[in-house]
Image (cartoon, rainbow, N blue to C red):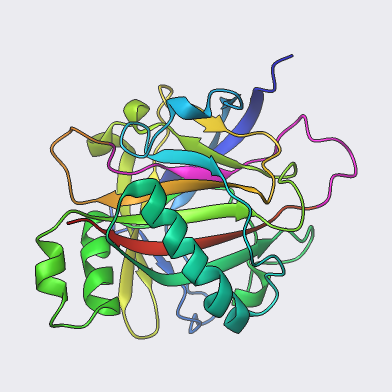
């Protein structure tokens, strides 16, 4: 029996006045000032369950890659412990899967869905139900300059580099609000992606909003367990068309979710990945 889902996915709509899209997360929004100036539209899309065919999807063809390896750290309750215990094993895993020679984790996010609560501070991060990509090419280069010593950055930028997220469920299987990934081979890079400025108190970042394209091929791994993971590519310095450059992704409400399934809990670590 198929586990494919027909569900509603939320896509990006650019500001109608042609202005630069932005999201203000500086925490200084005065009354009447929009937190963001872009919109969303919703479309019914099929999301294919690829369980049993995971090997067809790799970082270099689809932009994402599934795997199985239980983490040694399993509590995910304390940031210091996560950095001390989960970061080193994550670096080792990414190196083994990708063949990379250097991996630097620059942050992590725990997401716990809390029905009825707002996503208004870093301790209450919930699944993102909108198609997006975490970094643009410009933002990926800025990340390297921000997180690595000035003496190292120029030589690292001459090598192949990527930004890769390592995502996995925690506590229990992600039956509720799973993660959907869009096969890069179905993405029109020039037409489907729109840079969106992220305004922080002290700097700007940049993500991609994803416009609707009926050709998008969305995939997920039904009921991913904490022993399973997926690597999702957000950026790649190879841009000649020979490899996937990124993968749009979003959480989605699976209509096949059984009543009473525990709310989704997950962790993603975001990494700079370098090759010799």
- Residue 252 lies in the magenta-colored region: yes
- Residue 77 lies in the magenta-colored region: no
Q: Which of the two residues, 33 or 135, is positioned nearer the viewer here?
A: 135
Seen in the image, is 230 located left or right of residue 113?
A: left
Residue in the picture at 65% in, 61% down:
126
Residue in the picture at 66% in, 25% down:
5
Q: Answer with the quarter of the image where residue 207 lies.
A: bottom left
Span highlighted in magenta in the image: 244-262
Residue in the picture at 28% in, 70% down:
143
Most extreme residue toward the top, as rendered? Answer: 1
Q: Where is residue 221 in the image (x, y as percent from the top left)?
A: 61, 34
Q: Is residue 104 visible?
A: yes
Q: Which of the two residues, 131 or 109, is positioned nearer the viewer here?
A: 109
Query: Is 66 drawn above or below residue 94 in the view shown?
Result: above
Number of marks in picture = 0
Q: In which quarter of the image is the N terminus?
A: top right
Q: Where is residue 187 in the image (x, y as percent from the top left)?
A: 33, 31
Query: Is 188 drawn above or below residue 31 in the view shown?
Result: above
Residue in the picture at 24% in, 70% down:
144
By secondary structure, the bulk of the magenta-drawn segment is best described as: loop
Q: Position of residue 154 (x, y in %)?
A: 10, 71
Query: Is 225 drawn above or below residue 139 in the view shown?
Result: above
């Amino acid at each position: 029996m198929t586990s494919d889902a027909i569900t509603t996915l939320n896509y990006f709509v650019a500001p109608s006045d042609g202005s630069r899209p932005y999201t203000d997360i500086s925490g200084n929004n005065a009354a009447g000032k929009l937190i963001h100036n872009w919109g969303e539209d919703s479309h019914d899309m099929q999301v294919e369950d690829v369980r049993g065919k995971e090997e067809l999807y790799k970082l270099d063809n689809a932009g994402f890659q599934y795997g199985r390896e239980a983490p040694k750290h399993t509590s995910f309750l304390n940031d210091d412990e996560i950095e001390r215990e989960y970061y080193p094993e994550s670096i080792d895993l990414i190196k083994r899967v990708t063949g990379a020679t250097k991996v630097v984790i620059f942050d992590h996010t725990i997401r716990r869905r809390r029905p009825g609560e707002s996503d208004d501070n870093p301790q209450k991060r919930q699944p993102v139900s909108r198609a997006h990509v975490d970094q643009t090419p410009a933002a990926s280069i800025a990340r390297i300059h921000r997180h690595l010593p000035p003496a190292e950055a120029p030589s690292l930028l001459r090598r192949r580099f990527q930004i890769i997220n390592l995502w996995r469920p925690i506590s229990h299987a992600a039956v509720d609000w799973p993660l959907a990934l869009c096969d890069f081979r179905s993405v029109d890079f020039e037409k489907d992606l729109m840079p969106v400025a992220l305004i922080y108190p002290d700097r700007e970042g940049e993500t991609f909003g994803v416009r609707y394209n009926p050709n998008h091929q969305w995939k997920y791994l039904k009921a991913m367990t904490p022993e399973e993971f997926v690597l999702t590519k957000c950026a790649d310095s190879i841009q000649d068309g020979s490899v996937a450059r990124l993968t749009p992704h979003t959480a989605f409400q699976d209509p096949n979710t059984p009543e009473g399934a525990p709310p989704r809990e997950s962790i993603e670590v975001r990494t700079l990945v370098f090759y010799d």
